[in-house]
Amino acid sequence: MSETERGGVPELVSEAAESDAADALRGLRERFVLDEVVYLDGNSLGALPAEVPARVEDVVRRQWGELRIRSWEESGWWTAPERIGDRIAPLVGAARGQIVVGDSTSVNVFKALVAAVRMAGEGRDEILVDATTFPTDGYIAESAARMTGRALRPVAPADVPDAVGDRTAAVLLNHVDYRTGRLHDLPALTAAVHAAGAYAVWDLCHSAGALPVGLDEHGVDLAVGCTYKYLNGGPGAPAYLYVRAELQDRFDSPLPGWNSHAEPFGMRAGYEPVAGARRGRVGTPDILSMLALEAALEVWDGVSVEAVRAKSLAMTDFFLRCVGAYVPQGRVVSLTPAAHAERGSQVALRCDDAGDVMKRLIERGVVGDFRHPDVLRFGFTPLYVGFADVERAARVLGEVVR
Ligand SMILES: *Cc1c(COP(=O)(O)O)cnc(C)c1O
């Protein structure tokens, strides 16, 4: 028995081994730079894909160092935002030509929400925002509402169908709650927003790369997401903006930079927006981060999001069972919904002294994170986490809280 299996419940240890042996995604772990640590923080910063360092080296030394300005054309720098957007598109259920990569999620929330309010027109004087949103979306929504002269109303996602009405211009929602891991019903909520004649803006930070999103299928209007969580793009990697094809002509960006001009090198005084997804661009793209992201996305070649979702649910189920077996009754309480249809790819456990518990977990080689005031958060990234990791994490948690 190896060190990591010592003290485990034999049935759980062998179940983990069987699940790992049967896991069709198991080979992908080798495509990441990882060590003995059980890394359950990929919902905050995805692990480093092995192909990234050499690509970044090439981008810096050859593309920048040798080709210099020629790389805008010859190395495809200028078109990287759309090209990489098309690479992300299948992961979120979008056809090509609707996603551009660039700027942060926060900035893209601003673009998307203001553009949605402008599409809705003058008669609609309120914006609904997810009352449980990741804070930055809420701050940006407050400012967007002030700038556009709309009232901002926080609403729990489940209450959106009752709250949305003919005064509503746009609704900004998180697909998965960053704290609890609750998955909101994107198809039903989008349909409710549309039934009221309003626009739906979704933040996919905690769902893209973890579960099927179906942007086109469900008629989402605008969406944003980051690339450094489940997409493993690296710290501060650029985010993306999705604008549904039929709305692109009406996308009136509040940040109309020269990169979204119809003729960027015409250097004209007046702004005239380009057609298509490029309308979401602003200024010069962050090439080093963007091309690191492009290399990181190669691990997704041939990987189905459905398979990722199936493994994610199996892992979160198994983790909850292992926690039940290893952690004294009542010491932690799961905030993550039991129903698969309501669960993202993380488990959040409420726990007294969560900050201290997480510190000791990390010392013992199990990395999750702590969210104020009393939440232990464990993210399960199916590309590189296995069932033995899941069992070990729950076992070490049990030891730490005793
Ligand atoms: C991670 C996250 C963000 C992060 O925004 P940045 O601009 O990249 O800092 C925003 N919204 C949600 C829902 C997130 O989970």
Image (cartoon, rainbow, N blue to C red):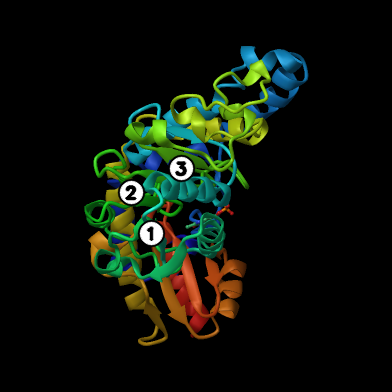
Label 3: which residue? 29
Label 1 with label 2: CB-CB less than 8 Å: yes
Q: Nearer the viewer, residue 97 or 388?
A: 97
* Crowding near the residue tagged with mark 1, few <14, some 14–19, many ≥20 C-alpha atoms within 10 Å: many
* Extreme residue in the front direction: 123
Hey, which quadrant is residue 6 in on the image? bottom left
Is 257 on the left-hand or right-hand side of 90? Answer: right
Residue shown at the point (49%, 78%) measured from the top left: 399
Which tag is nearer the camera, tag 2 or tag 3? 2
Label 1: which residue? 176
Is the residue indicated by label 1 positioned so its CB lies within 8 Å of ligand 1?
Answer: yes
Between disc 2 and disc 3, whose residue precedes?
Answer: 3
The vertical placement of 61 against 363, above or below, is above
* Crowding near the residue tagged with mark 2, few <14, some 14–19, many ≥20 C-alpha atoms within 10 Å: many
Label 2: which residue? 211
**Kind of residue indicated by mark 2:** Leu
Between disc 1 and disc 2, whose residue precedes?
Answer: 1
